[in-house]
Image (spheres, rainbow, N blue to C red):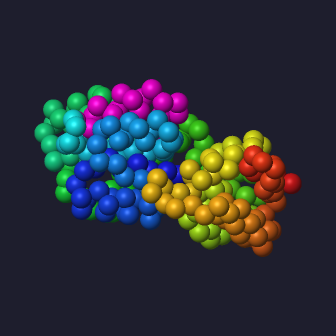
Amino acid sequence: MRVLVVEDDPKLGPWLCDVLADVFGSSDIVRTLDEARAAVAVRPFDLVVIDRGLPDGDGLGLLTDLRRQQPSPATLVLTALDEPAKVARALDEGADDYMSKPFSPVELIARARAVLRRLLLDKGAIVTIANMSYDIVNRAVCVDRKPIMVPRRELAILEAMVRRVGWVVERSTLELAAYGFEDEIQSNAIEAHVSRLRRRLREARCNVTIRPIRGLGYVLNDE
């Protein structure tokens, strides 16, 4: 799962990014509307957290761009403007939820989970393949109904393949899933992560296979 934070505050922005990354995995931060539009144009996001008071305009202006995307991400608007009319406008513009500053990490995570759950409900938030199940909202993997621990980057790679089960997932797609815009990626990083992920699933007696497709990427199937 990938989150985009659109926040220009030099302290709040990185804090939001860290809190959300701890729960949902990869998280990127941008500071203006223009940077946000550039980010969503090149990378799909599951959740976009948007501040209204940005240097180049009202963050609500981004909602129109996000509604045009298929699939469109969940959106959570943050602002110090908590008047009822301001809240109503944000929701009318297409925001899934609205939070007034200040707020606690607990409330932030709860609201983010709620909007993601609503977004994914019709798609099926839990994907089952053979004897493995993957909960997209809670980012939990179970084999034969027993949870297994998977590190963050391996989990992001597994999720990217679970969302495209039976199809070839290109190496570049896995890099986008596992790494942020500013992360440095080693040339063999994806291969190393996939190798460890395979071993982890094999040790859990998981009946799925991750097969390399030479020159393209990987495909996940049941055995």
Q: Position of residue 51 (x, y in %)?
A: 26, 45
Q: Farthest bottom residue? A: 203
Residue 141 in view here: no
Q: Position of residue 58 (x, y in %)?
A: 22, 35
Q: Nearer the viewer, residue 212 or 102?
A: 212
Q: Nearer the viewer, residue 113 or 151?
A: 151
- 150 w.r.t. 161: above or below: below
Identify the residue at image location x=29%, y=48%: 31
Left or right of 195, for residue 122: left
Residue 89 in view here: yes
Q: Which residues are magenta?
A: 58-74
Name the image quarter holding residue 208.
Answer: bottom right
Quarter of the rendering occupied by the C terminus: bottom right
Left or right of 29, for residue 101: left
Identify the residue at image location x=56%, y=36%: 122
Q: Position of residue 89 (x, y in %)?
A: 23, 30
Q: Farthest right residue? A: 223
Identify the residue at image location x=17%, y=35%: 86
153 magenta-colored = no
- 195 w.r.t. 5: above or below: below
Left or right of 90, for residue 135: right
